[in-house]
Every structure is written in C-alpha cells, then in structure tokens.
Image (cartoon, rainbow, N blue to C red):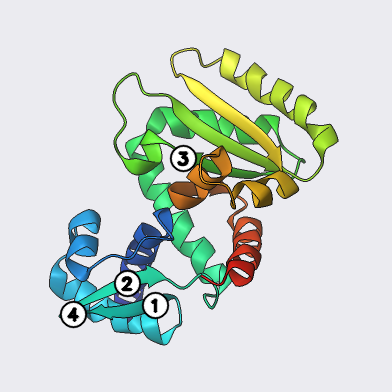
Amino acid sequence: MYNMNKISIYEDTENKILGNLLRTPLESKSMHQIAEETKLSYVTVFKIIPILLKKELIKLEKKGMSSLISVDLEKADISKLSSAVLYEKRQFLRKHLDIRVLLNNLEEALSGLFYILILFGSYAKGTYKKNSDLDLLFVVPDRKMIEKFKDKVNKVLELNPKKNVDIGVVIVEDLKEMLNQKYTVGRAAFTHGIVLFCAEHYYSLVKEYVKDKGY
C-alpha cells in the first residue's frame, strides 16, 4: 500500500511539473521558476527533472551555470502529455467551481460531437480578475459544423449570464494556419493555454506542427 501511494505521489508531481511546462510549451524555464510556479520545493523539482528527461518528456539546455527546461513536444508520448494536462485541468477546476459547472453543461449539450476545447487568455495565465472574460477556443473537424456548434454553445451560455465568455470556433485546418501567425487566437491558445477536452487529438496536431517547424 505504501509503495502504491509513493508511486501515485511521484506521478502527481511529474504531472504537475509537465503540466506547468505545457501551459507555455515554447517557453524554457529554470528549476527555480518551475518550483515557484508549481509551489513545489526546489529539491523536489531537482529530483523529478531527471525522471522526465529519461522518459523523453522534456528537454534540457545549458545556459551558463543554469539549466533551462522545456517540454519535448516532438518526442514526448501523447498519453503522458494528456495525463499531465488532465492533471492541470483538474487542479484548475477545483479552484473554479463555476467554470466546472459550465463545462459540464457544455459537455452535455455537445455530447456526440467531436471537438477540441482549449482555455486561454487571463484564466490560463492566472492573471484574471473578477470581471475578466473566460476565453474558450473550440476546434471542430468540419466547417459546416461551425454555426450549429456556436448555436449549441450559445444556448448553454445564455443559461450562465454571470460569466463573461468569449468563444471561438475554428476547424482543424484553420488552427494549423493560425499556429504560424503571431497574433491569432489559435497561436494564443497554443502558447499559453490549458486543453480542457480531447487532449490526445490536440497533441497529435501539435506534434505534426512541431515536427514541421523543427522546434
């Protein structure tokens, strides 16, 4: 029983560190920065980083006396990325019960439809204020679905007037194009976001993009 609990704690810690890096996948961070942002001790981060390196989930770059760490989007196993972002999602929703209720309502209304959902903007960055908008990007497979999709989402939002929600609905091809452009919602969601739904499909797309771009 002790060993199982120990394994679970290690997995949670690995997911916490990897999830932190996935929020800003193009950013490299020092161990001190990761420790500060995750509220983990520096010693804990120092112990976990070699494990993540061995699993090819992260990259390490030496800068003088410092080591800069980033997620290895090209080599990392998709299921491991998905587990880490699921951990991030759970931690986020524990702090935001109103958003959890909204997401449950959205999932129910969109049941049977394929989509990727990404949270971005101030809530993903942790810089939100009381009246900040909740920024959500939906990625759907077919352009014909967009209007129907928006209608379903807006009906749910009408029942939740207390929360200001900005939504974007794009198709997969549009998202791929947006990733190459600096000032787009797709790029914003990629560079600083939390995947809330269908993470495995999302990271499959990201892996293709990263491989093509050579990150």
Q: Do callouts 2 and 1 mark residues in contact (Cβ within 8 Å)? A: yes
Q: Secondary structure at mark 4?
A: loop
Residue 64: numbered disc: 4
Q: State which mark lies toward you, 2 or 4.
A: 4
| Foreground pick, 2 / 145 | 145
Q: Earlier in the sequence, mark 2 or mark 1?
A: 1
| Residue hosting label 2 | 69
Q: Earlier in the sequence, mark 3 or mark 1?
A: 1
| Foreground pick, 74 / 134 | 74
Q: Earlier in the sequence, mark 4 or mark 1?
A: 1
Q: Position of residue 90 (x, y in %)?
A: 42, 48
> With respect to residue 114, does 164 lie above or below?
above
Q: Residues within 10 Å of mark 2 (few under 14, many from 20)?
A: many
Q: Do callouts 3 and 2 mark residues in contact (Cβ within 8 Å)? A: no
Residue 59: numbered disc: 1
Residue occupying the point 43% across, 60% down: 25
Q: Secondary structure at mark 1?
A: strand
Which image quarter: residue 57? Answer: bottom left
| Foreground pick, 210 / 84 | 210
Q: Residues within 10 Å of mark 3 (few under 14, many from 20)?
A: many
Q: State which mark lies toward you, 4 or 3.
A: 4
Query: Gap between marks 3 and 2, in whole Å?
Result: 22 Å
| Residue hosting label 3 | 120
Which image quarter: residue 63? Answer: bottom left
